[in-house]
Amino acid sequence: MSNIASSKPSGNLAAVGSLLLSILVLGGCASTNETSQPQASQIDSAATNETVKQPLTLEQACEQGADCRTNASVYLASVQGEVKLNYDQYWPVVYEGEIRLLPGERVLVEIEFDESRQANVIRQVQEQRNPEQTFELFFAQVRGNYGMLMSFRNPMTQPVQFDVEITGVSGQQYRLNTCPIRGGMSFHERWPEPAKELILKQPRIVNEPSNGVMICSS
């Protein structure tokens, strides 16, 4: 390498070399632009043709075999008087990874967790065949009050937490989290207003605090 660098080409050879180098550089740029443009257009075309999967409506889900509830009635006390909600059909208790409770319902749900401590199997059961993974969930209006009571029992040995969505009588939605529910214990929480639905999402195992103090976060 050092011998080549130290040699001095004649003036004509140097000029020809410079010309060839310029042609190669320009040719390389043109080649790069020609190959990159079709790739970009292919990506844009693929993104345009990609269809987004839309969630099923209640009617579609029931028609396709979901275990929908039928002839469900909900009675709630409110400041304006008694509210009665009738459903010819309603979402299953467990559907698409979510747990839905109507006021007055007490359900059993088995939850299996994967190695990342996220739920990978959620199913409603009628009895406790696997007590170590069967959660007992309850949602009801407090007697003599307009508020609601939520109760969750964690059968596991580790703390579990849920995301919560509450739907008010007029359809307004509120999103919050439960406190971490200790293993083998129950969690009770009150909501100050009438609510027509409770949805539990993203059940997950959380860390046991080193100081033994559980902290709630909304």
Image (spheres, rainbow, N blue to C red):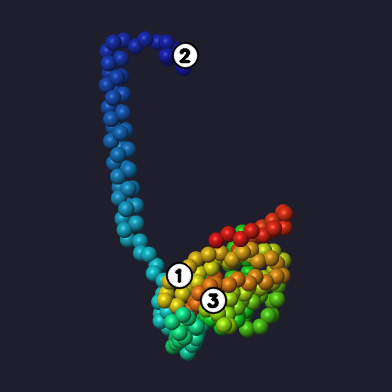
Residue at image coords 42%, 76%: 170
Label 3 sits on what residue type?
Answer: Gly
The reply to whether residue 80 is visible in this rendering is: yes
**Is the residue 18 above or below the residue 149 in the image?**
above
**Residue matched to label 2:** 2
Query: Residue 54's x, y, as percent?
Result: 39, 69
At mark 2, the secondary structure is helix
Cα–Cα span, label 1 and label 3: 15 Å
Kindly indicate the quadrant of the structure image that contains residue 46: bottom left
**Is the residue 194 above or below the residue 203 in the image?**
below
Cα–Cα span, label 1 and label 2: 76 Å
Query: Residue 86's x, y, as percent?
Result: 45, 87
Query: Residue 89's x, y, as percent?
Result: 45, 85
Label 2 sits on what residue type?
Answer: Ser
Tell which residue pokes out farthest to the bottom in this image. 71
Q: Nearer the viewer, mark 1 or mark 2?
A: 1
Label 1 sits on what residue type?
Answer: Gln
Q: Is residue 81 left or right of residue 218?
A: left
Kindly indicate the quadrant of the structure image that contains residue 56: bottom left
Q: Are marks 1 and 3 in contact (CB under 8 Å)?
A: no
